[in-house]
């Protein structure tokens, strides 16, 4: 009987740990576009912004700081973020990637910030995707 009690305690502990862990991971399900964007991001953006978007020689593109900066830079939806990025990034050659790659990268960045995305982010629906905490 004592063993059964112990087992129950262990089980409850394991269950609550699992619940805490899953609630911490605020990641939304990836869309194929966002996954593809991860590849493009690692080629074109990660050398400066970090592989995990945590920043490096350039600011982090994930988390509270990024969301606050987004407001300051005047982009609070996906369409405006797209515009900012195509007009400014990468700094040595703004606008040098294809439209498709830029949209995928924007989808990747937003997903990493836990923002829900339409299955395919485009000019037509990006204005409705708000950037928020
Ligand atoms: C050569 C280094 C470099 C590369 C490559 C680069 N960036 Fe940047 N990026 C910067 C720097 C530096 C800043 C800060 C500029 C500023 O605040 O005036 C910045 C700023 C930004 C910002 C604004 C951040 C904020 O806090 O508001 C975004 C968004 C961004 N970059 C996205 C991208 C994306 C997407 C790519 C890939 C297509 C990219 N960058 C590639 C250097 C880089």
Image (tube, rainbow, N blue to C red):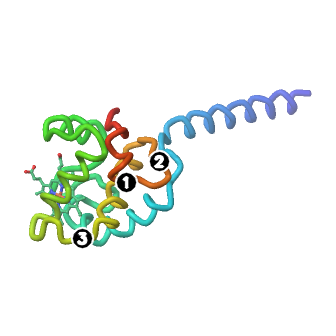
Residue 17 lies in quadrant = top right
Q: Secondary structure at mark 2?
A: loop
Q: Are marks 2 and 1 in contact (CB under 8 Å)?
A: yes
Residue 8: image location, x then y, percent: 80, 30
At x 29%, y 40%, the residue is 77
- Would you name the residue on which mark 3 appears? 97
Question: Where, quadrant-wise, is the N terminus in this rendering?
Answer: top right
Q: Farthest residue to the front: give it.
A: 124
Q: Is mark 3 within 8 Å of ligand 1?
A: yes
How far across and down, in percent of the image, does residue 28 sit?
Answer: 50, 45
Residue 27 horizontal side relative to residue 61, left or right: right
10 Å neighbourhood of mark 1: few (<14), some, or many (≥20)?
Answer: some
Badge 3 density bin: few <14, some 14–19, many ≥20, Cα 10 Å: some
**Going 39% across and 49% down the picture, which residue do you hit?**
112
Residue bearing mark 1: 122
Give the distance between the C-alpha atoms of the residues marked 3 and 2, in whole angstroms.
22 Å
For label 2, the residue is 118
């Amino acid at each position: 009987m004592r063993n059964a009690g112990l087992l129950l305690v262990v089980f409850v502990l394991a269950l609550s740990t699992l619940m805490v862990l899953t609630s911490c991971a605020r990641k939304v399900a990836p869309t194929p576009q966002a996954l593809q964007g991860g590849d493009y991001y690692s080629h074109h953006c990660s050398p400066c912004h970090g592989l995990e978007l945590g920043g490096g020689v350039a600011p982090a593109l994930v988390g509270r700081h990024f969301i606050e900066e987004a407001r300051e830079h005047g982009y609070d939806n996906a369409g405006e973020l797209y515009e900012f990025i195509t007009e400014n990034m990468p700094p040595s050659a703004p606008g040098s990637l294809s439209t498709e790659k830029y949209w995928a990268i924007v989808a990747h960045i937003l997903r990493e910030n836990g923002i829900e995305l339409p299955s395919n982010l485009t000019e037509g629906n990006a204005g409705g995707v708000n950037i928020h905490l």
